[in-house]
Image (cartoon, rainbow, N blue to C red):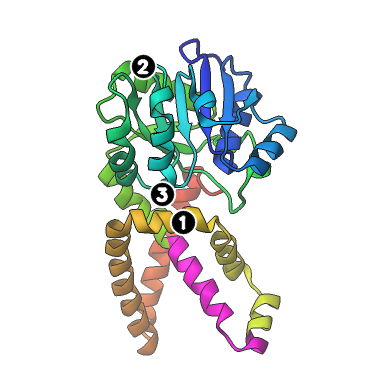
Amino acid sequence: MTDTALSKVAIIGIGLIGASVALAARHRKSDCHIALYDRDEAVRKTAQGLNIGDEICADSAACVADADLVILAVPVGAMKAVMSKIKSHLKQGAIITDTGSTKRSVIRDIGPLIPDNCHLIAGHPLAGTEFSGPEAGFPSLFEGRYWLIIPGEAPQEKVSQLEQFLSALGAMTEQMDAEYHDRVLALTSHLPHLIAYTIVGTATDLEQDLKNDVIRFSASGFRDFTRIAASDPVMWRDVFINNDEAILEMLQRFNEDLSYLQRAIRWKEGDKLFELFSRTRDIRRSIIDAGQDS
């Protein structure tokens, strides 16, 4: 991995994504100097012990100083506060990107804070696990995964620099409009997490004996839901608050489809159930064919 245009990359937030970016860059022998910062001192010490990146900074200003690329790997609800602290320390011409799961809110919150001589290119890696913290990071997280970017008004040269860096991490980049991104992710990511949280929450409200047996005899379906529901609660709280419009739209559509399924079960309409299950199986096969099944 070589990118002479980016001599220093600053990462704010050393969780799963931030740590994985740093490790991927190192693993691919990047010529970039990778500086990291996290507001949690314990996280910084852990990252230091794990030798993540080239430099663990004690404050955000030092982290972003002279950085050609700044990556905000923090919950979307924290983006504005972070940008407020670092905006006066940014290098002229720096690219500012993020890893948040909502894009309209990020652009709304930090766009007005970007200095005139810097360039905001919002982004979202479609990669992750249910684990969090610097110890959860690993260098292959982005290999073969999409990293969506919203170019906005950034010059093509800057967009190309970011795409080159992300591609070198193993990601597949694709440009997208912010509003369209939020609607797509509301269905493919946000709604599934909401359903998972709800189902696991329902299990915790069961009578004690039944709840114990649900846990003991968990089949693969419920285990998958618990894996999703184990994701970072701060991050997902912020996602639902900041993409409420698109999520509520998809939730309404889901409720309508659920009512249709409920009626089909009640009236034993096997043909309708078979047709639905056949269509959804085809979607699963398409995901496997696209290499996005793991």
- Magenta: predominant secondary structure element? helix
Residue found at x 42% / y 69%: 277
Where disc 2 sits, the SS reads loop
Residue at numbered disc 3: 77
Disc 3 and disc 1: Cα gap in Å?
Answer: 10 Å
Q: Residue furthest top?
A: 4
Is residue 138 toward the left or the right of residue 194 in the image? right
Q: What amino acid does circle 1 point to? A: Trp
The answer to which of 284 and 213 lies nearer the viewer is 213
Residue 148 appearing in the image: no
The answer to which of 241 and 87 lies nearer the viewer is 87
Looking at the image, is 9 positioned above or below residue 227?
Answer: above
Residue at numbered disc 2: 93
Q: Residue furthest right?
A: 49
State if disc 1 and disc 3 touch (CB < 8 Å).
no
Is residue 105 toward the left or the right of residue 146 in the image? left
State if disc 2 and disc 1 touch (CB < 8 Å).
no
